[in-house]
Image (cartoon, coloured by chain):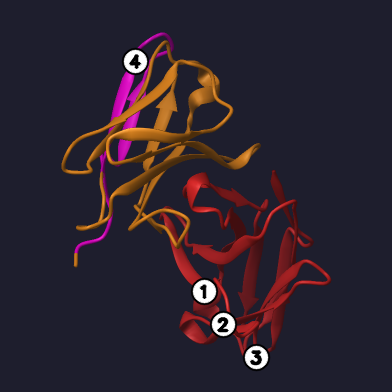
Chain colours: A orange, B red
Amino acid sequence: KAGVTQTPRYLIKTRGQQVTLSCSPISGHRSVSWYQQTPGQGLQFLFEYFSETQRNKGNFPGRFSGRQFSNSRSEMNVSTLELGDSALYLCASSILGGSEQYFGPGTRLTVT
Amino acid sequence: AQSVTQLDSQVPVFEEAPVELRCNYSSSVSVYLFWYVQYPNQGLQLLLKYLSGSTLVKGINGFEAEFNKSQTSFHLRKPSVHISDTAEYFCAVSDRRETSGSRLTFGEGTQLTVNP
C-alpha cells in the first residue's frame, strides 16, 4: 500500500505571497491532519479533516486554511506569507481518527 | 487539554549500550500514547503505540515502551542500540474520545545520538 504523499517537497516563496500544499492519504484513510514543525515551536497541530469536514483546529491565525476533497485528498493554504511561516509542514492520515496516524515526508516551505 | 514533556533533549550513547528516552504526560482525559521517530529530512515514522491492554508495548526496530498510569509516563527503551538508531524521537498523546478526532500533542523531542 502506498504511503502518505505530499507535494511539493520543497518550496520557496516571498513574504506576502500565498501557497497551497497538497496531501494524498493512504488509500482507505478518511482522516487527514496537518502539522507545522519549526525548531522553535516544535510540532504543532494545524487542523484535521474527516469526510470533507474540518473536525479539529489548532491555534493558528486565519491565514492558515485547508480543505478535503471527496477522495480524501487534502490541501492546505497559507495566505499573506510571513517569514515565521518557514517550516516543515507534515500531513498525516488515519482510518477513523483517534488511532495511530501515518505521516508523509513533509513539505519544506521557506519564506524569504 | 494535554501536554507532553520529554525529559531529555539530547541523549548520547555508545553503540550496543541500552537506552531509555523519558516521556511524561498530563491530561484531564484518557489518552492514547505514541512514540514516533524522525530521521533527517524525513517525516515521522510510528515506532509503537499504546491503545489499551498490556502496559508493555513492543514496536519496530527492537524498541519497547511501558505505560505507567500512576506516574503518567511512557518511557521508550531499547536494550542495545545501533548507529542507525541516531534520530530524533517524539512522544505524543491523543484524546481517546472519538469526537475529539486525531489531534496529536507532541513533546519537544529527544535527539538520540549513537556513537561508535
Q: Earlier in the sequence, mark 1 or mark 3?
A: 1
Quadrant of the frame with the C terminus of chain A: top left
- Identify residue for label 3: B79
Q: Does residue B1 belong to the magenta stretch?
A: no
- Magenta part of the protein: which range? A2-23
Q: Residue A34 lies in what quarter of the image? A: top left
Please report, as a chain letter, where disc 2 is located: B
Alpha carbons under labels 2 and 1: distance apart? 8 Å
Tell me whether the residue at label 2 lies in contact with that at label 1, contact meaning CB atoms closer than 8 angstroms. Answer: yes
Alpha carbons under labels 1 and 3: distance apart? 16 Å
Front residue (pair A93, B81): A93
Q: Residue A94 lies in what quarter of the image? A: bottom left
Looking at the image, is A16 positioned above or below residue A38? above
Q: Does residue A22 belong to the magenta stretch?
A: yes
- Identify residue for label 4: A18
The amino acid marked with disc number 1 is Leu
- Identify residue for label 1: B48
Residue at the extreme left: A71
Please report, as a chain letter, where disc 4 is located: A
Alpha carbons under labels 4 and 2: distance apart? 41 Å
